[in-house]
Image (spheres, rainbow, N blue to C red):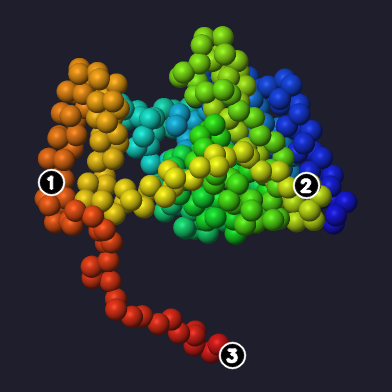
Amino acid sequence: MTAANREFIRSVLSAVIETDRTGLLIDNRARGLTGISGLKTVGLLQRLQRLFAADADACYLEIGVFQGLTLISAALEAPTMPCFGVDNFRILDPEGKNLSIVRERIAAFAVTNARLLNMDFEVALENLEDHLGGRRIAVYFVDGPHDYRSQIVCLLLAKKFLHKKAVIIIDDANYADVRMATRDFLLGHSEFRMVFEAYTPDHPMHLDAVTKAQAESGWLNGVNVLVRDANGLLPPMLPEVPADRSLYFNEWLTHRARLAELAPEALALADAVTRKDEVSERTARARLEAAYAIARSLFEERHSDRNVVSRGLTEGRINRLKSGSK
């Protein structure tokens, strides 16, 4: 078993190295398949799919479908493998067209093994047994919400459904929250190892034209790649994260505050004030007041601080052994 695992990890490393050197395995852009994933990320998914194409126990799962680039690219490389894409299409979709775009592209590419789970990612992950048909997730692409909790939830809830040789590709690892979740997962689950990480110096929207083009043909906004390594064949490797954890402590201060949900608007106003940008300040203030007006009745019910959201919870509840347990 150790020898088989060693050979598999070598094949994953070879796929990563080849992808980092040459990028896409198959280029479908001329046929209308586009998106916002780095081309090397897509190329790695293509190669990993081929590793599992003949495994009747394997399936592919991704969190965050957008317009179908990664889902369809993965499905095309393993036509008999079920490929599941989870997305409720509520973000990065201002015109509400992405679901239709994905369905049209699935039909255009005649992909019969791509299956959309049009729902919240947590709902999908909590009920995966209803969808996977007994298969195990061999290639898992995490590209959903990038806050710390969403990232760690994606890893924890999927863990029991992962294939014995699972590979996890975590996108947008430039974000510190994403790397922190990867790091915490690895520290708590020693049977997984990181085999590759790559980053760009900033978010692509802030890069100059030349560097942005390189990022788009590469790993775009960063990537972490993990592999199941139950035999400890690889040494531990962790992504670098900020030593200062004050932002995470500040989450508690934010969550308990009366106007917690207005944190983005409040920060935008604070930014405008500190920059002494009067135009932006007026805009940010108007948006803050508008957001407050929408949920004013909710905010007025709260305390000024230490809102614990515990009203109505039980004063005591005990769990009991199942009937027939010894």
Q: Indicate the quadrant where residue 238 lies.
A: top right
Q: Are marks 2 and 3 in contact (CB under 8 Å)?
A: no
* Residue at (26% x, 45% y) in the render: 261
Categorize mark 1 by other alpha carbons within 10 Å: few (<14), some (14-19), many (20+).
few
Percent x, y for residue 13?
77, 36
Q: Quadrant of the N terminus?
A: bottom right
Mark earlier in primary sequence (2, 3)? 2
* Residue at (56% x, 19% y) in the render: 216
Where does label 2 land, which residue?
235
**Nearer-the-camera pick, 209 or 305:** 305
Look at label 3 and name its amino acid: Lys
Look at label 1 and name its amino acid: Arg
**Nearer-the-camera pick, 32 or 286:** 286
Categorize mark 2 by other alpha carbons within 10 Å: few (<14), some (14-19), many (20+).
few
- Secondary structure at numbered mark 3: loop
128 is higher (above) or lower (below) than 287: below
Where does label 3 land, which residue?
326
Q: Indicate the quadrant where residue 111 lies.
A: top right
Where does label 1 land, which residue?
296
174 is higher (above) or lower (below) than 275: below
Q: Quadrant of the C terminus?
A: bottom right
Q: CA distance from mark 3 to mark 1?
A: 53 Å
Q: CA distance from mark 2 to mark 1?
A: 53 Å
